[in-house]
Amino acid sequence: MKKEISRFFKKLIRAIRKKILRKGVRRTYSDAQRLAWYIYKFSSSCGAFKEYPSKENLEKLKKTTTQVSERLGVKLNGILEIASKYLENPCSELKQTLNESARDLIIDILEKGEVKEGENEDL
């Protein structure tokens, strides 16, 4: 009898886990984790584009940058125009300008996080 009950609960647990996983239960992340993820994602995309300037990598950079901008409410500061120019002429001056624009975008992302934390402290 105990074995049958044990088997029943094991099957039930497996079925529940499968159902939960199929529904795509989303994890919750802290604001810091979320900001760190977007900074990492943007930096990786930007680095791949600078390492191998191609139309495909530019499209990936555009997609990632637009995603970051929309989801975090950060202004793009002309980084995509600079990246397009860099694709046409990958010189050191444009690379430096691209680096500076990327740095400024990351600073904007970090400042967004500070504003949220400041808002939470007042509550």
Image (cartoon, rainbow, N blue to C red):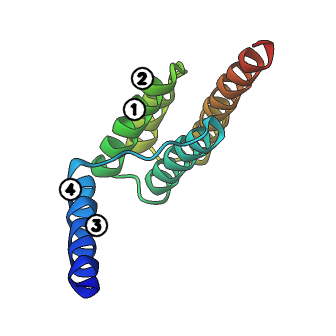
Question: Which residue was labeled with disc 1?
Answer: 67
Q: Tell me whether circle 1 and circle 2 mark residues in contact (CB < 8 Å).
A: yes
Q: Is residue 72 above or below residue 10?
A: above
Question: Which residue was labeled with disc 4?
Answer: 19
Residue 4 x, y percent position in the rendering = 20, 82
Task: Indicate which label's residue lies in the foreground, 3 or 1.
Answer: 3
Asked where in the image residue 112 lies, by quadrant, the reply is top right
Query: Residue 28 bears which disc, if any?
Result: none
Q: First in sequence: mark 1 or mark 4?
A: 4
Measured in 3D between alpha carbons, the distance from the residue under mark 3 to the one under mark 1, in whole angstroms, is 37 Å
Residue type at numbered disc 2: Glu
Task: Indicate which label's residue lies in the foreground, 1 or 4.
Answer: 4
Packing grade of label 4 (10 A; few <14, some 14-19, many >=20) is few
Residue type at numbered disc 4: Lys
Measured in 3D between alpha carbons, the distance from the residue under mark 3 to the one under mark 4, in whole angstroms, is 10 Å
Residue displayed at 51% across by 25% down: 72
Q: Seen in the image, is 12 located left or right of residue 59?
A: left
Q: First in sequence: mark 3 or mark 4?
A: 3
Query: Residue 13 bears which disc, if any?
Result: 3
Q: Quadrant of the C terminus?
A: top right
Residue type at numbered disc 1: Gln
Query: Residue 70 bears which disc, if any?
Result: 2
